[in-house]
Structures are given as C-alpha cells and as structure tokens.
Image: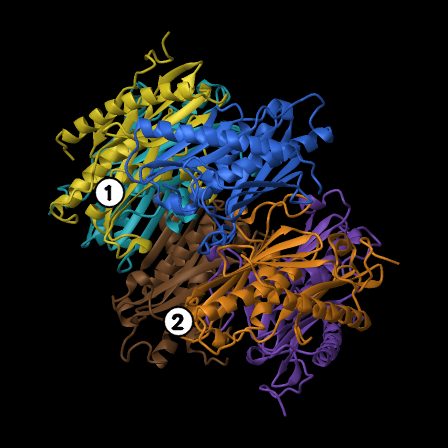
Chain colours: A brown, B cyan, C yellow, D blue, E purple, F orange
C-alpha cells in the first residue's frame, strides 16, 4: 500500500543539495526535500558575542524563517508584526543546537558562524531540511575560514556530519520524511537529528493524536536512523563535487 | 555511589502539590520538586479564540514565565525587554501541547482554559514541574466548569492524567529528576511527558555534549516512565484531598 | 457600623511578613495584607547603571508586576503584549522612590539593589503591601551586603524604615487599608508612604468621585500615619525573628 | 529674600493662555507658565472605546509628550525607541484623571474627547501647565460639541473648572510654581490639582531629599490652593475673550 | 571607455525572468538583473482591508525585504530587531505605488493582491528589479483570478505594464542599470518607473555628492526611458512563454 | 483662472520664518507655508555615532513627526503604537539627505547635529516646509558651534543653502506649493529640493493618477526651481535679521 506520492514507507523524497547559491556568503546551499526548498547561508565573522569573549572559543548559531508565501496561504511577515513567533524561535534554537553538536568550539577559535535558513517553499519537513542543508553550508564556511587562516592551521572545527529527518505514524503506519499532507494527518510526529556515526543529537517526538507507546517509538527511531544515514551520504556527495560559483 | 543530594539515580526529589493557592483562579496549585517551585493557575473563560469559533470545540493553552529572581542570578523581566525569549516560547508551547493531549476539546465545548505557570524558584526541571502541577490545576478548573454547568452534563473533557519528568546522563549514569547542578553537568538531557497509562505525549532528548546512542536513550526512557508513574500517583492523591480554600 | 470584613475604620487587615522565601535572592519576603499577597525579592549586584558610574554612589530600583491571574479576571501578560502598562510603570517608580528615601546611596557604594515585587494575589493595596514588604527584603539584602563586605565596614546604607498604606473615604467614612471591594466604592483614595519616624515620603491622593476638601485630607492623613506606625512595628518584629532558610 | 527670577515665594510665573492655536482641533491652547510652553489640543470623536459602548457615557483621556528638544539636552523620541517611558505614562494618566474630575460622562453622552498635551519648551511644571491648558481646550471642545448638537441640548458635561500647580520646599522655604532650576533643588516637590471651588482632585507630594512633616505639607497645600484660585481666574478670562481663529 | 563589467553606458545587465517559481503562489517570479536576484510572489485573497470595505474596489500592496546574507556583510534580520527599517519601508511603499499605477481597482473588485519581493542576492538595483519582476507575478495572479472568476468576466484589472530601472552619474558619465560597485561611486542616483507606453510613474533622483543640474537630469531620464522600453519587451516575452509548473 | 485660495499657479503661499523659537536648542525655527506650521530645532552634540568614530567627519540627521492633531482627523501617536510608520521614516530620511547635501562633514569635525521637525499644523507641503525651515535652524546651530569653537576656526561646514517645494498637476495645470485640498486632487505630485545655486538635491515625482510625460515633468521642474529661488531669498532674509531670544 503506497503513499500519496507513491513512495514506500521507508523512502526519502528526492533530495537535492546545490552549493554555491550565493556569491556573498562563505557557505551557501539550496536544499530540497521534494517540494520543500530551503536556502541556507553560512556567514563567518571574526569575534564572538560579548558573553563569550576571552574564552578562546567560537560560536555557531542559526536563524530560521519562512517567506510569507512559502506556504499555501500567505502568512504575516514577522518583521511586520514586530515579533518572532514561538515556532520560529523553537526551530532556530533546534538548528543551532544541532550544528553545535558537531562543532569543536575550541578549534574554531573566537569566530562566529551564523546560519540563515530561509524557507522558499514549504511542503513538510522544513526544519529537518534546514539542518541537513545548513550542515553543508557550515562545512563550506569552515573550509573557507581554514583557507583564510581565520581558523588556525591544523585545527578541525568540524567533528562529524549532522543530518535530520522527520518521521511519523499515519493511519497506524510509521513513515519516513512526511510531506505536508501526511504531516497534518500524522498521529505522532517526530524529528530526529543524527550525527554521521548514527548517534542522536536530538529526538523530539510529539503525540498529535493518541499518545504513543515504546514500540511505536522504536519503529520511528529505526526509520529515522536509516534515513539519516542516506542523508549523510548525500551530504558527502555534495561536498566532494567541484563547485563552480 | 549517591547523588549531590543523596538520592539514588532513580529517585524523585520530594514532590509537594498544594491546591487552592489562589482565591481567584478556578484551579490553582503550588507544586514543588525539591527547591523548584512553580505556581500554576487555571483560568476558565466562556468562548474560544476567533479561529476556533463555531467549531463546537474548546481550547486549552499555557503561558510559562520565570520571575526575575527565581534563578541564582537575576534575569531581565521579559515585559521590560518587550519581547518573549525563545526558551519561554518553547516551554509555553510544550505545556499547552502536553495538556491538550488529555483534553477532549469536543467535550469541553466552546470554552477556554489558560494555564499560567510562573516559576517562583528554579532548581532544574521547571518545565516538567509546570506540566505536572498544571494538570492538577486543570483538573480542578474542569471540575469547577462542570459544577457551573459551563461544561454540559455528562461530558468528560479530561481523558487521562498527564505528568512530566526530566532525565539525563551525568558522568555516564542515567539519572531521574535532575536538579540544576546535575542539569548543567548532564551530557544528555531529556524531558518526557507521559499519560497516566504510561504512554508518551512528548519525548525531547538533547545531546548537550557527545551524541547519545539507542541504548542510552532506552535507559533514560525507562527511568522517565517509572518517574511519571510515581507523579501520576501523587497527582491522584492531591486531587482526592479535601480542599479548604 | 462595621466594614465588609468586620474591621473598624482604623484597623489594618491581618498582616504577615515571611522572610527567606527564596533560596536565591539576597533578601526575600512574602507579605500579605489580608488576601493581598506580594512576593518581594531584593537582588544585589556590584556596580551601578552606566549613568551613575564613577559617582561613588549606589542605586536602588524596583519592578512591580501582577501575575495574570492575581485578580478576579485574568489579565494579559505584559510580556506577551510586548509593553508595560502605565499603571505598572507608575507603581514601579513609586516603590523605587519610596525605598530610595531611606537609602544613603553614598554609604551603599557603587552597588545596585533591585526589588522585584510580584503580586501573587490581589485584594486591594498591592502597591502599599509591595513597599512595606520590599523594605524588609531590602534590609536583609543590605545586611547580606554588609556581611560580604560589599558595603564597606562601618557604613550604614539604611537610614530609617519605610512603610506604606492605603486610606480612602467610603460612604463618607475615612477608612484604613482598603480591600478591593472597598477600593472600588471609595470616593477618595490615597496612598501614603511614611518613614519610621512618622514623616511623609509620598502622599498621593486622588478624588475618584467628588473632589475632597482639606478636612477630609486631614482625616485620611491621620489614619494613614497611625497605620504606618503599626506597619513599622511589624517590620521590626519580622526583622528580629531568627530566619531559617 | 527673593527667588532666582525675582518672584516672591507665593507668586506665579507670568501665565498666558492663547486659544485657537490650531485650525483643525475642536479646542486648542498654547499655554505658558514662564518659559514652560505646552500646546494642548482637544479632539472630539463620536463614539467611545469598546469597553464603554452601550453605557450611554462618554470618555475623556489625555496623552502627554515632550518634544525631543523641549529640554536643555535633547532626549530620545519615544516613537523611535518604540516604547513610552514611565514618566510619560504617569503624567498622561494624571492629566486624564484630572479632567475627568470635572466631566459628567452621562451628560457628555457616548462621545470621546482626547487631550493631546505636547511640551514645546520645558522649564519646570510641564504637567501642571498641561492640566491647566488642557482644561481650556476641553471647555472649547465641549462648547463646540454642544453647538454641533453632538452633546444633547440642555446637557452640561462640564461640572466645574480644574487647574494645577506645583509647589515645593527649597532651602527650607515653601515656594509656588517652581521653575526647573528650583525644581532640581527642591527637598520636597508636590503637584496639586484643584477644582474651581478650591477642593482637591489630586495631591501628589514626594520627598526628594529628607521626608516632610505634617506642618510642611500644610504650608505647601496653602500655597497651592491659592495658586489654583489665581489660575482659575486666568482660565475664566481666557474663555470669555472673543476668539479670532 | 567601458564599465567594470564591460557594458556600454546604455546597456542593461543580463536580465532573466523565470515564472512559476513557487507551487503555492498565484503568481511567482525569480528575476535577476546580473547578480541581483529577487524572488517575487503574488498572493490573491478575496476581500480587502477594513478601510476599503464596501467600496467595490480592490487593493494591491507590496512588502520588500532583504535576506540577511543577500549582501556582502550579513545584516540583522528585521524580525529579530523587532522593527522595520526606514529603507525597507520606503522601498515597500514604492513598489506598491508603482504596481497600483497599472491596476484598475474597480475592475479588480474587492480582492487584494500582496506582492512579496525578497532579495536573495543583492548587487545594486534591488528595488527596480523587484518592481519589474513583481509586475510579471502580478500579471500571472490577475490571470489566475480571472480564470477562477474571482475577477468578474470581461473586466481587465491590468491597464498597462510597468518596469523600473536605476540610472546614475559615475565619474561624470550617465550610466544605465548600476551594479553595486557603480552605485557606491555614483554622484547622482536615480530610480525611474515607467509604464509600457514610456510615461513616468515615479522619478526619484538623489544627489549623493554634488547637486545635479537640469541637463544631467535630462540625460538620466533619456537612459532610463530607453532601459524601461527594453524591460517591457522582456516582460512581454516572459509572459507569452508557456509555463510548466 | 485662479486657485482655491486665489493664488496664481506659480505663486507660493505666504511664508514666515521665525528664528529663536526655543530657548534650549542651538538653532530653532517656526516656519509656516500658509497654514502648514513646522517647528524645527537643531541640536548640537560633540561626538558622532559609533560607526563614524575616528573618521574626523561629522554627521547631520533628522527626525520628522506630526503631532496627533496636526491634521483634520486625529492620528494615533507613533510612540503609543510603538512603531514609526513608513511615511514618517521616508520623510525623516529625505530631510536628513537634503541637509547633508550642503554640509561639508570634514569641516564640521566629529560633531553631530540632529534636526527635529515637528509638524504643529498640516495643510500640505509639510516635508518641504520642514526642509526649508530646518536649513535655517541648521545655519544657526552651525554658527553657534563656530562661536563656541566646537567647529575649528576657519572651517565652513555649510557649503550652500537648501530649500524645498512641492509642485503638482491639478486638473491639467501645473501648480506650485500645493495646499492640502489641491494635493489630494493632484494627478501628479512632486517634491523638489534645490540648493541656492538652483541645482537639484532631490527630485521625487509620483503619478497619483495617470502617468506623466516628459513635458509635464519639465513644466513642474520649471515651477519648482523658481519657487526654490524665492525660498532661498526668504531664508537669507531670515538669517540676517537680528535675533532677540
């Protein structure tokens, strides 16, 4: 019994990762998970926020945002409303934590990298696409900083890769990489962030309908872990491609 | 090998639940998990937000806040800064989702219940104490609404109990109900929200240091599930006590 | 002819002052005037705001706030609205001025004490309870700072005690310490702040209905002065009690 | 022993009240107390704020503001900072309450009058000049509304006149109508709002230095009451002058 | 003597207009003027803002924004700062006015079209690219609304085409379509918005260095008018291409 | 065929420029163009904004605002709404740019002059009156700074005069200096800022109805250039009058 778009339960949507999408940013990626498209840029600045000065350690942070018409119905611009909504805050924090999990702040030195993840088109899984794409932009930015000697010679700020995927239970079946239509029907929804070695950085499961039990949780983690392995391979492929900017 | 405060790894801090702490609110609780104290009130109003009007369904939402000096160092008041921080937003949303998991919105009818969870003193686990206390305030508010016939006769808006606890891995050992000092040292930190029948409403695990593997995740879920069973019993005890307001 | 709650016109409500209500703050008090309960904390930090640096003088300031459901009907949270209302601003400034009236800023040295006064339950007279309680928290904080040598040896930043009470004319009769029900019916409402020696720090009288004349003003000041003498005695009693935190 | 500007202790500064200073507003006044100049407009609109609809009663409110360079040193514009300061809030509320003391809201009917008091030049006593000038603008606006039959025939929304003056103790001497230089040196500072019949609408006394006693309070009230009588006469004179707009 | 990028003074950069860049929006375009790339979406909603209800007329408005890293140095996100800057406001208003110049609001009926113009990469001329691209998105949205009978049969809300270009004087030479590097060196900078028939909708010239005279103004208008003719042809070409979304 | 107020098409309204309208500001002017009245103050402070420190150059900036009842219908106060509107932003920026066009920032040295332009009464042309008046206040402030040796001896920060006027096409006729009633009926509206030598600093033309052609643009520029010559003469006259403050 197949899914809306004909996929099997454990199948990712087509994923594309285009590097060098910005002539200004030190790292930039346009990532798509099916119809979900997120533009990720990594900006390097020397120096760190005030509370971190003198620590010898760097900082990596992220800001997530959806363009007003990235969704089916136009949403208000947060800049116009004058405040950032709770969901935006929550996702920005999640992306930042996920990337810091693979950063050695000491090796980075007192430099800051900001990841901007702007959703151009949304069809479910925007936060996981953002993390997966931001990692690639971050890797390019770190390489740039190493090339410019902003990161000291011999230091390796990146300790692993990191990727993320959504999973959920729809009509009793655990599914990988939900599109929007599946997402709204899911009884349970989980976002999982894994490092390249298959361990967990974040596990966020939410019962949208009935609570879920330990067995269901296990099935979802199995799917997500496998999905993240596939994404890690796609990230590696993207990073070895020669880049023509 | 015992913990900072002499507890065993699987032991809760002393938990107290005092109902009727406000003469105004329809439900109110002062809950403490050790030195963490959260004041929870439930406010019932007839009617629902605009986007829900005419649906025949009610709404339950929550707002979390820390008093400026609930922590060791005074924090700025969010009202003075003029914006709510990401962490506050994130926790308010978590509390709301957790409580809605045990509410039958149809049975509630077009009524709104707002849970205010104000942290008077913080020593780790404020969000889980807030959920656990807010449930009791919610139960009192629902009973009040039933008594006033605001909820129609024979309808049962509450479908189960809900409680939450934090768990984490400190120096390689999985621990239940972290106090602040343990929390800052934890490599992995997880908040788990369970219904009274032991199923999950939310599972939020975060690697603060090294990523965690499936086995560690399992050990933490075991601890949390058992902790929530104990909290559910304490909630039931509190709710059967005669209340003198 | 007695009052709603059986008091005589010149009688205070039962007043309780519990010190040491926070394990974090340098001074903390839960004060109640009948059903009005205000939680006051005093936070000491070394250093002063920028505009006062290098003056050799300290600073004392206050922030007042009502929890959303401290009143009969839930009010919006000011942090959520994104701005502080006029009444909140006005009361915060009043508390700050009242406390500075008994502080020798030179003796305090370049240290700052912030008083947070959060109303947990309101039944009239929240601002006067806040001032009266905040004084006790301030006294504890000053003593703490002297003990820690943050205030130089031999210096006495506190020059007197300070307390406050509301008075008003209800149905033609001047009354001391109005509860909410009396307050809404008062033709004239006055808040009076006195030092321990019976002199005035603030006198704020407002005609809510008809204007008031000099004789009525005199009667209200008589009541308030006597009330403040009683409060000063209660403050002294509270401060000599051994504190077990 | 005379004052900075040669006045006796009980003497007002030269006061001028120019009506018809705006071609748009229903009432408008440029008032000066010496070098303090406040531009007051009264705007009439039919209808009342939502919370007052259907009551049959009108509403009068006020907004006070200082132009950035009305003072010796330029202050930030509150619109640019994005929030209104506590002092501005406090004074706006004081002006509104003072004017409502002489308004019969029933007689006004469901109409709203907003008083805007913008300080063009400040030299002490801006809030009392604002109240005194706003009353005259209000009287013109009420007359306009009566002429337009917006207020029903035979109804008299204005019940009395209202004026305000500052008093203070400088070097031990009680003085009327402090200019800025006196104000900063005052030990005690009081703003008094009186109706035309000499009764009090507001009495706000603040000890800036040492607390003040009952006798000093009495001397200040004597000065202020006499000053308000003079201001009431000036208001009446201004209102009987033919106006050429 | 050629320009930085080898163009002649009266030559546009390569312009591309890709329609159908969003699966959600009723009209969408990715436009580039050389390295300047702006993503424009047009969102149709039935109904109009409150102030226009019952007029029978529609409304067209625009919001412009730059992604934080669309420029060489990362800028703060306006949503994070909590306020929209003056430049953003100014450009959003310019785009809205320009498009309304070719809209017959009566023919549109009580419908609203919002144009979102988000700059993905900036290299000078972002506002003129935004107007030029937004016109194409608007045309698609109008056609969609006609197809859906949201616009009544036989009505033609679009009265003409509209395009915009920047011109400026660099080292004494008038140039068309300045890139960023030319823009910062320009003594005079002008943005010109023309309808398809070559008339002006907006002319905004600014002396960045020395003031400019009538002859220079004339030379700039000549260049701009010709440039807009070319852009109008490109818009027409884009709109006749078959679109595969 | 004459205009609403009897003027010929090329005639200015009566213009008055009163200097020394503030005892505090270093330069101050009350300017009127007919019933439009704008109060302009120039405030000098030593030092420059952070981004300009160490450059040896000064800075001139402006803030424009309308009093709430400067217009026929009372507008909300921007300080109360908590944000500055697009129109206010746009005009503030225009005034700043216009004045900087006649300032030699090097000659000014590291000093800042802020022009505040507050509209007391509006009847069309407020931005052009503001620029014209602000120039005079600026000239007084520069002279003051030269007198105080804040500007070094022999340096001349002012390089020319600057004035501004509105022009527009009403019923097919180009008119100078539109009053409000003409402004709302204008098909095309243009604001022109000229230096004393008749060259352009800003030209901002907008089609309110039908687009305008090159010939109409020429006619409007002719009118505006002549108007600015008259204004420059009035500015010179005002500046040579002896000032009694």
Above or below for E3 versus D42: below
Disc 1 crowd rating (10 Å Cα; few below 14, some 14-19, many 20+) is many
Residue B177: mark in rendering: 1
Frontmost residue, B38 versus E101: E101
x, y percent for residue D139:
62, 32
Frontmost residue, C235 versus A114: C235
Disc 2 from disc 1: Cα separation? 39 Å
Query: Which residue is farthest bottom?
Result: E1
Disc 2 crowd rating (10 Å Cα; few below 14, some 14-19, many 20+) is many
x, y percent for residue F166:
71, 63
- Quarter of the image for residue E129 reads bottom right
Residue D101: mark in rendering: none
Callout 1: helix, strand or loop? loop
Chain of the residue under label 1: B
Residue under pointer 2: A44
- Quarter of the image for residue E19 reads bottom right
Query: Which residue is farthest front?
Result: D1
Please report the residue visible at 40 percent of the width from the left and 69 percent of the height from the top.
A138
- Quarter of the image for residue E137 reads bottom right
Frontmost residue, E162 versus D194: D194
Q: Look at the image and tell me in which quarter the C terminus of chain B lies.
A: top left
Please report the residue visible at 27 percent of the width from the left and 35 percent of the height from the top.
C134
Label 2 or label 1, whichever lies nearer to me, is 2
x, y percent for residue D103:
58, 26
Question: Would residue F7 be found to the left or right of residue C187 on screen?
Answer: right
Frontmost residue, C235 versus B99: C235
């Amino acid at each position: 019994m197949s899914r809306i778009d004909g996929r099997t339960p454990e199948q990712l949507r087509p994923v594309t990762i285009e590097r060098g999408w910005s002539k200004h940013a030190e790292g930039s990626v346009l990532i798509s998970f099916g119809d979900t498209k997120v533009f990720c840029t990594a900006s390097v600045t020397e120096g760190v926020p005030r509370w971190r000065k003198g620590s010898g350690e760097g900082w990596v942070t992220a800001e997530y945002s959806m363009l007003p018409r990235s969704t089916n119905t136009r949403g208000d611009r947060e800049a116009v409303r004058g405040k950032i909504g709770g969901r935006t805050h929550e996702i920005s924090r999640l992306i930042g934590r996920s990337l810091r999990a693979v950063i050695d702040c000491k090796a980075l030195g007192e430099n800051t990298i900001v990841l901007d993840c702007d959703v151009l088109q949304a069809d479910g899984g925007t936060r996981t696409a953002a993390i997966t794409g931001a990692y690639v932009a971050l890797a390019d930015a770190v390489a740039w900083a190493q090339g410019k000697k902003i990161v000291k010679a011999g230091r390796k700020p990146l300790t692993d890769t990191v990727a993320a995927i959504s999973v959920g239970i729809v009509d009793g079946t655990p599914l990988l990489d939900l599109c929007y239509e599946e997402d709204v029907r899911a009884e349970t929804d989980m976002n999982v962030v894994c490092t390249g070695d298959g361990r967990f950085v974040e596990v966020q499961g939410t019962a949208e309908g009935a609570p879920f039990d330990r067995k269901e949780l296990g099935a979802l983690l199995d799917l997500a872990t496998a999905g993240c392995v596939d994404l890690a391979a796609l990230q590696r492929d993207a990073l070895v491609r020669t880049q023509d900017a």
